[in-house]
Image (cartoon, helix red, strand yellow):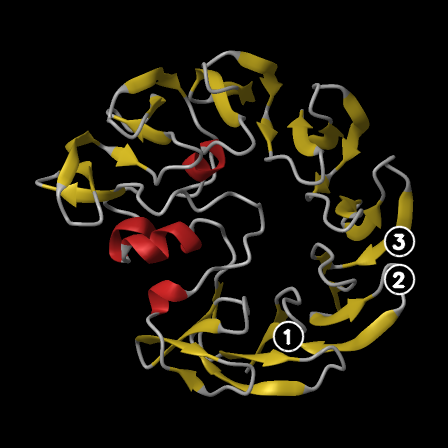
Amino acid sequence: MKKNGLFFTVSIFLIAIFSQGIVYVAAENKKLGFIDKAGKIAIEAKYDQVFPFSEGVALVQIDNEWKLIDKSGSIVNKPVSSYSPPLEYPYPPGQEDDPNPEWIDGKIGYRNKAGQVVIKPEFDDALPFCEGLALVSKTDTNYGYIDRAGKVVIDLQYLTQDIGDFGPMLSSFYEGLAIVCTGEIFDKKCGFIDKTGKFVIQPQFDSISPFSEDLAIFSVNDKYGAIDKSGNIVIKPEFDIMESFFEGLAPVEVGGKWGFIDKTGKVVIKPAYESAKCFSEELAAVRINKQFGFIDKKGNMIIEPKFDYVGSFKEGLAVFGQD
């Protein structure tokens, strides 16, 4: 939640869902809408920013206003804060009574639902609570964790990954584990700690993802592989780029082309695409000749590539963008 970043310019509610990386933002002269699984336009492209459908509604921005819409494109008369995004990584949103971080007199503290300051403002960076702990920093570099009472329970001693404003979010706790890094800013290694601050997977990776389907993607010397929750390497680091596993498959880049592997590391869809997204609802977006379409898990083209941009399918609809 850095003051000069995206997080400071939006509400606490939008902080939580922007940080998951699932917002779709229209490029210049482009608008966003939704297509169905037949590739037909279900909701015309007229929005500037869009979050995918979840529980029957999507969060959209039009004319600088955020609104909720249903699957017919009609406005839903509910507060935007009622939207619950389909998180790419299943981070819990925290407890209903968790205090929220907020800038107060030049520092970040936490207020409860009644607006009372319950954790004094003393942090330069701070994130919402996950599993009872919140990531905080007083120096913008050394991070640790506080409990709901504001007590430091894991010393402010760790670095986070280099992914801009979103890097620290990967250090929130999920299923009892959090990613942290040690070493120097330009020469760090990453691993996983538990809620006592003990390393359960030693810091040995240049970068690492949260666990998805029991595997975490890591990089060493610019090559990507995967480990299990015991820290065992189950897929050797031999891919140029590798994304997380969803629905049993992961996108990989080899020699400038993208395909898919299974959890043994076997290539099941030959690298032949300019880019590829993770599978969702049995379909994955791929790009050919600068246009996106969708394939199934056998590599069959289900929706022909004809869109400038697409997101993943959620509840039967996917975001698309066109000039």
Residue 152 higher or lower than 24, as above or below: above
Query: Where's residue 318, x and y in %?
Result: 63, 72
Q: Are marks 1 and 2 in contact (CB under 8 Å)?
A: no
Please tell me which residue is depicted at 35% across the width and 32% down the height of the picture.
134
Q: How many marks?
A: 3
Identify the secondary structure beneath mark 3: strand
Of mark 3 and mark 1, the one earlier in the sequence is 3
Residue type, mark 1 in image: Leu
The residue labelled by disc 1 is: 317
Q: Can residue 222 be seen here?
A: no
Q: How many residues crowd mark 1 within 10 Å: few (<14), some (14–19), many (20+)? A: many
For residue 269, the mark is: 3
Residue type, mark 3 in image: Ile
Please tell me which residue is depicted at 71% across the width and 71% down the height of the picture.
292
Q: Are marks 3 and 2 in contact (CB under 8 Å)?
A: yes
Q: Can residue 284 be seen here?
A: yes
Query: Where's residue 319, x and y in %?
Result: 58, 73
For residue 16, the mark is: none
Residue 155 located left or right of residue 244: left
Please name whichever residue, 160 or 88, is drawn nearer the observer in this view of the structure: 88
Query: Where's residue 125, x and y in %?
Result: 28, 34
Which quarter of the image is occupied by the C terminus? Answer: bottom right
Please tell me which residue is depicted at 58% across the width and 29% down the height of the picture.
207
Please name whichever residue, 11 or 27, is drawn nearer the observer in this view of the structure: 11
The residue labelled by disc 2 is: 299
Of mark 3 and mark 2, the one earlier in the sequence is 3
Residue 112 located left or right of residue 232: left
